[in-house]
Image: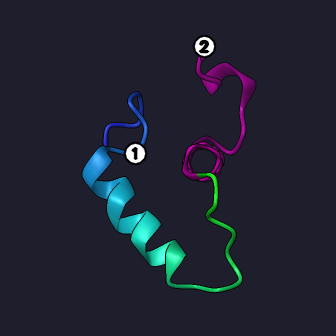
Amino acid sequence: MDYTQGISPPQWSKLYEYFESIPRIHTRNEDKAKRFMEAVFWILRSGAQWRMLPKE
């Protein structure tokens, strides 16, 4: 995964399909779900260090 670009479309489609199969996960708004997962991956990767915060 190229972390500067986020989750690739093929990766996201597999993740989203998995999330939709779990009733307790809210997936109505796909864009918000993707942004949330990208944030989770960023925190895991960086430890939430300000110097690694993307400009976006």
**As rendered, which of 52 and 41 lies closer to the eye?**
41
Q: Which residue is mark 2?
A: 55
**As rendered, which of 54 and 51 lies closer to the eye?**
54
State the residue at coordinates (41%, 28%).
4
Amino acid residing under circle 2: Lys
Q: Position of residue 1 (x, y in %)?
A: 31, 46
What is the tally of numbered marks visible in this picture? 2
At mark 2, the secondary structure is loop
Q: Is residue 6 above or below residue 36?
A: above
**Label disc, if present, on residue 7 of the rendered structure:** 1
- Magenta stretch prevailing secondary structure: helix
Q: Residue furthest front?
A: 28
State the residue at coordinates (34%, 59%).
13
At mark 1, the secondary structure is loop
Which contiguous range is marked in magenta? Answer: 30-56
Amino acid residing under circle 1: Ile
State the residue at coordinates (38%, 55%).
12
Earlier sequence position, callout 1 versus callout 2: 1
Magenta-span inclusion, residue 31: yes
**As rendered, which of 40 and 36 lies closer to the eye?**
36
Q: Position of residue 38 (x, y in %)?
A: 55, 45
Q: Is residue 18 above or below residue 32?
A: below
The answer to which image quadrant residue 27 occupies is bottom right
The answer to which image quadrant residue 11 occupies is bottom left
| Pointer 1 with pointer 2, Cβ within 8 A | no
